Image (cartoon, rainbow, N blue to C red):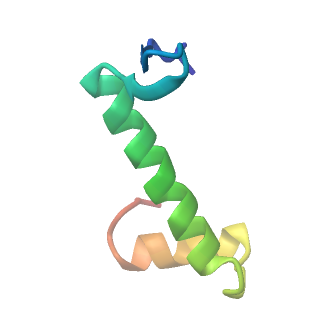
Amino acid sequence: MDKIREKFLIDREGKKTDVVLPIKDYERMLEDIHDLAVVAERRNEPTIGLDELKRRLRADGLISH
């Protein structure tokens, strides 16, 4: 992962109050948060084996062989 290039805004006492990020870093962080939310939602779903996954992908036409 690339280093995040943030800048901080501070108040008169020198305390950080806000952060400014390049839009690409912000969008990447939002995507990561979304991915983590999906994982959390699905954590109690049953798992399937690799062979079953391949079978399903073939049946849906997403992979060949």
Can you name the residue that lies furthest to the front here? 13
Residue, x 57% and y 58% (percent of image)?
36
Q: In the image shown, does 10 or 51 lie closer to the viewer?
A: 10
Q: Is residue 32 above or below residue 1?
A: below
The location of residue 20, given as percent across then percent down, is: 34, 22
- Where residue 19 appears, as percent x and y from the top left, is 41, 25
Give above or below for 39 relative to 12: below
Image quadrant occupied by the N terminus = top right
- Please give the name of the residue rendered at 44% of the width and 15% of the height, measured from the top-left corner: 12
Foreground pick, 23 / 58: 23
Of all residues, the one furthest to the left in this rendering is 23
Q: Is residue 27 left or right of residue 42?
A: left
Q: Give the vertical position of 20 relative to 56 (above or below).
A: above
Q: Decide: is 22 above or below 44.
A: above
Q: Residue 45's x, y, as percent?
A: 67, 86
* Residue 39 quadrant: bottom right
- The number of callouts visible is 0
Q: Which residue appears at 51% of the width and 68% of the height? A: 38
Q: Position of residue 14 (x, y in %)?
A: 53, 13
Residue pictured at 35% horizontal, 76% vertical: 60
Side of 47 relative to 26 (left or right): right
